Amino acid sequence: MRARAVQRVDAPKAAARRRRSRGRVAYTPQSLLAVAVEAFNQRGYDGTSMEDLAHATGITKSSIYHHVRSKEELLRLAVSRALDGLFAMLEQPEARTGRAIDRLEHVVRVSVQVLVDELPYVTLLLRVRGNTDAEQWALQRRREFDREVSAIVRRAVEDGDLRDDVDPRLTTRLLFGMINSVVEWYEPSRTGSATDLADVVMRLAFDGLRRHGTAAHPGEGGGAG
Amino acid sequence: MRARAVQRVDAPKAAARRRRSRGRVAYTPQSLLAVAVEAFNQRGYDGTSMEDLAHATGITKSSIYHHVRSKEELLRLAVSRALDGLFAMLEQPEARTGRAIDRLEHVVRVSVQVLVDELPYVTLLLRVRGNTDAEQWALQRRREFDREVSAIVRRAVEDGDLRDDVDPRLTTRLLFGMINSVVEWYEPSRTGSATDLADVVMRLAFDGLRRHGTAAHPGEGGGAG
DNA sequence: GGCGCCCGTCCGAACGTTCGGTCGTGTACC
DNA sequence: GGTACACGACCGAACGTTCGGACGGGCGCC
């Protein structure tokens, strides 16, 4: 998209130049973005002013405009990063070939991984409401993602691997409702690794939270309430 | 709560007075709220100006202030309504007595019902980020709700009715992540009734989306990661 | 039954503040 | 001396909110 060809020709020079007078490291669009997105997630995009960002970054409003064209550009960069991660996953061979249920498992596992790896960016993406052009575009791509996953679910139902008494589109929405909720509560320190989390999500999503198989437990457990 | 005793002594009078010159019906705080919440959900609370509300209601900004004290009061009224519905459900006898797994089923089913019945209000509640006092209070009550449901889940695990290989708190979060996602896509006309939806949610949540019983597909055994 | 006042409802025009964004300048480094 | 980065001062527009007043139906009074 758009002209990006000659963007980083002078990257080494720029990196070297990136330290400033008092040894402070200058911002790059990426490092600025990281701070901005954190603020956006805390107070909401509309609820965050450029002055808030100035305070969070330690530079002034006008200095921010040296790195990015506008506030909306920050939003666009953020949701792009999130969407890139999700769509890259759909391009992986494990998501495109093989039995549908296996492809779906891959999609679920890697989605959780992407959510955790790119947590703040995906968080912001999931909160976009469509007020601006950038947000409209993000919504559109999210719908596209949803459609592609739905197709896999539908195929897995046809294969006889998934229950056929529920609409695939509805299944997809509920499944990703569960996955996406990760951004609401995940904390790297408190919650486990992304891999462990993906395991739990897989187990709950595919086998449900009811106890299976053994049924060897004593009927009453611990007295009535 | 608070003093409501003598509030509606002149209710009939007020109702009669509630029609205006050209036959137009005047706003009540409730009818105003309905319009406001719809706007909030479309553009976000911070993204909605009082002028937006004026346009949506057909009266002027200043007239809105005749009915409510502030923009934030509208938010407070909205999230209160949502929270009242959810906590009322927790007070029902079916949620307080009996086997934990049955209580949980009741909580899940009625939660879906409340979400659908009070869709715009719950939608707004779930998007609150804690910028203002009203939002902080809403977040606190949401956490309280979560804690109460978690306790039921934990008990159901102890009873041996739910799988014990997953942390109850995590289970609750994923479960309600799935349920709450309803606000992102539910449309009364397109989606089925709330009861049907609750059925689907129950089936997926408790038994998973994998096909059961028959197991007529070639094994191969998923492979671990 | 006609009159006059009250009050609920709404309005247009402002208020002071904050918004996203611009401008001209300073300064350290290559 | 050119470039990268930062600054403080500033802009017009939009923000949430306030204010004084207009309009008209319901009710007490005669």
Image (cartoon, coloured by chain):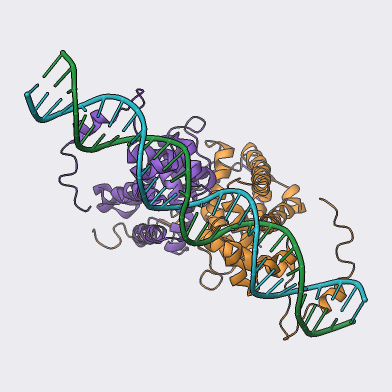
Chain colours: A orange, B purple, C green, D cyan
Please report the residue visible at 55 percent of the width from the left and 46 percent of the height from the top.
Answer: B210
Q: Relative to the observer, which residue lies in front, D8 or A8?
A: D8
Q: Is residue A113 above or below residue A178?
A: below
Q: Quadrant of residue A188?
A: bottom right
Left or right, B26 with reference to B186: left
Q: Position of residue B34 (x, y in %)?
A: 40, 39
Residue B196 vertical position relative to residue A43 in the rendered view, above or below: above
**Where does residue B204 sit, x and y in percent of width and height?**
49, 45
Asked if one can make out residue A180 in the rendered structure from this viewpoint, the answer is yes
Q: Residue at x 89, y 61 (%)?
A: A6
In this image, B204 relative to B30: left or right?
right
Q: For the C terminus of chain B, which image quadrant?
A: bottom right
Image side of residue A107 versus residue A47, left or right: right
x, y percent for residue B62: 41, 43
Q: Residue at x 48, y 36 (%)?
A: B56
Q: Is residue B88 above or below residue B129?
A: above
Residue B183 visible to an observer of this rendering: no
Count all numbered tags in the image, as a single digit. Answer: 0
- The quadrant where residue A157 appears: top right
Residue D28 located left or right of residue B158:
left
Residue displayed at 43% across by 44% down: B202
Q: Front-most of B6 and B98?
A: B6
Residue C2 x %, y %? 18, 16
